[in-house]
Image (cartoon, grey):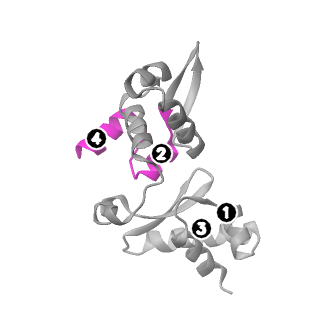
Amino acid sequence: MNVIRAVEAVLFSSPSAISVEEIAKIVKSDRKTVEDAVKKLMNEYSSRDSSIEIVKVGKKVLMRVKPEYQRFVTRFVKSDLDKATLRTLAVIAVNQPIELSKLVKIRGNRCYEHVKKLEDMGFVKSEKKGRTKILKTTEDFAVYFGLKGSRSEDIKRALLGA
């Protein structure tokens, strides 16, 4: 079996980012071999003129359509985030750093579970400040959504197409 092609098949089929350990279990190989395969695939995809890329999102790996080609496939793809959670993420991204208490006033009490999910996905980080938390997006958020940075200025620029 060609481990590189097996890893590529797993990445292609995975609906979300997946860890090297998970891939190793699936392809029945060791972690080091899978890490090497992922690196080779990342180089292979970045060196060709393709609309597909492989990126690291935290400690996980994701095969995705490059951001500049997303608009062609959005109607076929199911998002990892429901609309309400995505809206909460948008409010955090545009207004960061934002206090959780202010976010609750904007988005309502359901945003507590949205924030938990976003933290679990690695898109948002929180820092304790008194009786509330300060929320900011992470670099993983920027990578996942194909942004140049996770600062609110970068996000506003991307949203406005500037």
CA separation, marks 4 and 2? 15 Å
Assign a secondary structure to mark 1: helix
* Mark sitting earlier along the chain (4/2): 2
* Residue under pointer 4: 157
Quarter containing the N terminus: bottom right
Circle 2 packing at 10 Å, graded few (<14), some (14-19), many (20+), is: many
* Mark sitting earlier along the chain (2/3): 3
* Residue under pointer 2: 141
Eye-nearest disc, 4 or 1: 1
The amino acid sitting under disc 4 is Arg
Eye-nearest disc, 2 or 3: 2
* Mark sitting earlier along the chain (1/3): 1
Residue 70 lies in the magenta stretch: no
Near-viewer residue (45 or 80):
80
Q: Could you say where residue 128 lies in the image, as x and y percent from the top left? A: 60, 21
Assign a secondary structure to mark 4: helix
| Residue drawn at x 66%, y 80% as measured from the top left | 3
The amino acid sitting under disc 3 is Lys
CA separation, marks 4 and 3? 31 Å
Q: Could you say where residue 91 lies in the image, as x and y percent from the top left? A: 38, 33
* Residue under pointer 1: 20
Q: Quadrant of residue 22?
A: bottom right
Q: Write the start and end of the magenta stretch as one range.
A: 136-162
| Residue drawn at x 55%, y 34% as measured from the top left | 125
